[in-house]
Image (cartoon, helix red, strand yellow):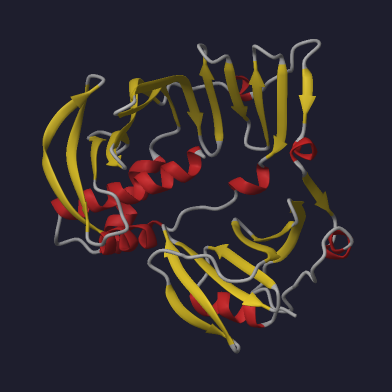
Amino acid sequence: MRGKLMLVLLALLSTVLLAGCTQMSAEEMARNIEEKYNAVKDFKGILRVTAEGKSGKMVMEYEYVFKKPNKVRMHNKEMGTLIVSNGEKMWIYDEKKNEVFVMDVGQYNQVNPDYGELVKDMLKRYDVKILGSEKVSGRDCYVVQLTPKDNESIEAKMWVDKEYWYPLKIEHSIGGIKSTVEYINVEFNTGVSDDEFQFTPPEGAKIKTEEDLGIKKFNSVEEAQKHVDFRILKPAYTAGYELKEVSLMFNSVSLMYAKKDKMLMITEAKGEELPKMQNAENVKVEDSEGLYAEIYGSSMLMFKKGDVVVTMTGMISKEELIKIAESMG
């Protein structure tokens, strides 16, 4: 969850820089973004999430600690919820029930963002205007207005830390509800210990795993095939990606492929028609109609083969993604 939000905000941030330095190319700007982002080794503060509408106002606060590349600790004392991840395992501890949900997350943290693609994608969808400067939690920030060029995106306002180019606050409204995500009392590069991201369940705590949620993992497609009522499609061509994991959840099969630090996910399930996908391009996958979109530097392709709807996502070109799809039999 946190990783996805960070990719979105980094992408938005890149448009700020382009607005201030119009002579720079997207590629040059992406390199600057990466350089500043690389300067942040760890980060801690209070994460405050606010939602306000006609029915009232809701505020949630978490003590928040993050360390690169993928370690996080979030604690909501009022709710009694503690979330800890060391990059390989995640623990979600309900202090009131004394229950711990444990899951493996290492395979989901292997994708590095393509900063150039993030920049290009956001420039297509937003007009950017720097409104001025304000302080957030005592830090100097640029105030940025993001106005969508289409009818699908959401208008937003963002406060960007001037020193680290890190988004400290973002707010938007949708459906009459105003939402704000803000980091307060922030500190950068304090030398956070790895011990912060380890968790030992208290004595007597009930341990729950992914299987309690109906998630099953297999060593091969053949093993998974015994548990579903449709034929699992496996690509003959994978562009050098290797199959790492096969999982099943609610009669939906996911095949996870990896190549170095990049991931390709193929999800399959029975379906009558393709789901709707915003801002999608119509493409051909052999004789079938498909939908293709680029989202924050990642490619997504959906198509239907027989009674199976296939969704493919990864940081890979459209041409390669279609070639993989056409090899599935």
Quadrant for the C terminus, please: bottom right
Relative side of 319 to 95, left or right: left
Q: Position of residue 53 (x, y in %)?
A: 30, 30
| Residue placed most toward the observer, 112 or 246 | 246
> Residue placed farthest to the bottom in the image?
287
Q: Position of residue 21 (x, y in %)?
A: 15, 54
Q: Residue at x 70, y 74 (%)?
A: 307
Q: Position of residue 163 (x, y in %)?
A: 25, 33
Relative side of 97 to 34, left or right: right
> Residue placed farthest to the left in the image?
132
Relative side of 165 to 237, left or right: left
| Residue placed most toward the observer, 48 or 236 | 48
Q: Residue at x 69, y 63 (%)?
A: 269
| Residue placed most toward the observer, 136 or 94 | 94
Q: Residue at x 85, y 56 (%)?
A: 219
| Residue placed most toward the observer, 85 or 187 | 85
Q: Is residue 211 visible?
A: yes
Q: Position of residue 212 (x, y in %)?
A: 78, 35
> Residue placed farthest to the front in the image?
55
Relative side of 20 to 286, left or right: left
Image quarter for residue 286? bottom right
124 vs 324: above or below: above
Count of numbered marks: 0
Image quarter for residue 305? bottom right
132 vs 182: above or below: below
Q: Residue at x 58, y 74 (%)?
A: 303
